[in-house]
Amino acid sequence: MNISQSHVGLAPVLPLTSFGNVLLFLFNAVHATAIVFLNASVFLSIMVNRALRSENRFMYMLSTCLSDICSGVSYYYSGLLDVSEDYNSATRTYYIVPTFLGLSYMAILAAQADRFHAITAPFKYSQRMTRNRTLLVILAYWVYAFAIVAVQNLVPKGVYKSVTGIGTLVANIFTVVIMIGLNIRLFLIAKYQLEREPPSAERDNKRASVYLIIVVAVCFLVAWLPFFIYIIVCMFRGNVCYIVKNEGTDPLRILARLSTIITPLLYIKGCHALRSTLLSQVWRTTCCMKKG
C-alpha cells in the first residue's frame, strides 16, 4: 500500500466474526472511553479549583491528563481499526499517537524530579521553581516530543532507525534506573526526614504529595517495564520479536496504556482536595446539567 493513496478503507482491526474478536473490540472501546473520561474529569477538577492550580505538582497532573486524553481519543483509531504505524502505511499517524504516551511518561518523570527537589531543598525549590519556570519545563518536554516527531517524519527511514535505535535503548535503560533510584530516595526521605519535622499541615501535604508520586511512578513502571524489556531484548537481538496488527492487539502496549487509567484513579484516590472538587463540582454539575 502506497502512502500517497488517497482513499483508505478502514475496518475493525479483526473481523467481528468470532466472540473473541468482538470481546477484544469492546474491551478496546471501553478502554479508550475510560481513559478519556477519567483524565478529562481530573483535568476539569484542577482547572475549576484555583487552590489546586496554585501548586506546581498539579501543573504536572494537568500535563499528564492532557496527554492521556489525547492518547485515549487517538486509541479509538489506533486500537479499534485496522491501521498501522509502519513507515509505508497509508493509515499511519506519523508517530503522533505513540508520542502522547511518551509525553505522559515524561510528565511523570518530571513530576517525580520536581517532588524530589521540593523535599530535599525546600527553600531553594521555592525560589527556583516559580509557576512560570514550572510551565516552562512542561512546555519544553512537549516541544521536545514533537520535535522528535518532526525528525522522524522528515528523514529517510534508514537514517531515522540508525539515529534513534541506540538512543531509544540508552534512554529506556537510564530512565528506568533513574525512576527506580528516585523512588527509593523519595521513600527514604518521606520515611525519615519528614518524621523529624514537627506536625503541621505543610508536613502532611508534603508527605501526601511524595507518597502519591511514588505510587504513581511505581504503577507506571509496572505497566511499562515489560514493554521496555521487550524493546531492549529486541534491539540486542537485532530483529523484531513479534508482529501485531495494531496497538489494540499488542498485549504489551495494552498493558502500558493501562497506566493512563491507573494514574488518574491514583490522583483521585490520593488527593482529598482533588477528589472533593471532582465529586462536588465536576461530576455533580455534569449530572445536574443532564437532568435539566
Image: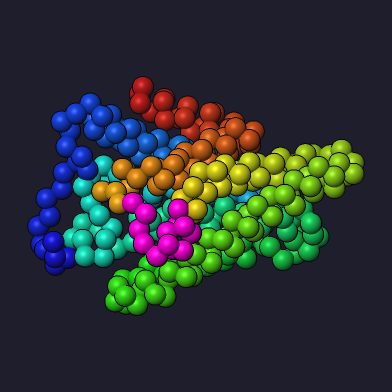
Q: Where 222 sits versus 108, above or below?
A: above
54 over 212 or under it: above or below: below
Q: Is residue 50 left or right of residue 12?
A: right
Q: Position of residue 199 (x, y in %)?
A: 87, 38
248 with respect to 54 (left or right): left
In the image, 180 versus 80, the foreground residue is 180
Q: Residue at x 63, y 36 (%)?
A: 271
Per the rendered image, the range of residues in magenta is 230-242
Mainly helix, strand or loop, the magenta region? helix
Instruction: Report x, y in % for residue 136.
Output: 57, 66
Apparent side of residue 198 relative to residue 15 in the rendered image (left or right) = right
Quadrant containing the C terminus in the rendered view: top left
Q: Position of residue 116 (x, y in %)?
A: 72, 55
Residue drawn at x 53%, y 41% is 263
Quarter placement of the N terminus? bottom left
Which is more toward the observer, 194 or 9? 9
Q: Does residue 184 show up?
A: yes
Q: What color scheme is it?
A: rainbow
Q: Is residue 232 magenta?
A: yes
* The quarter of the displayed image where residue 256 is located: top left
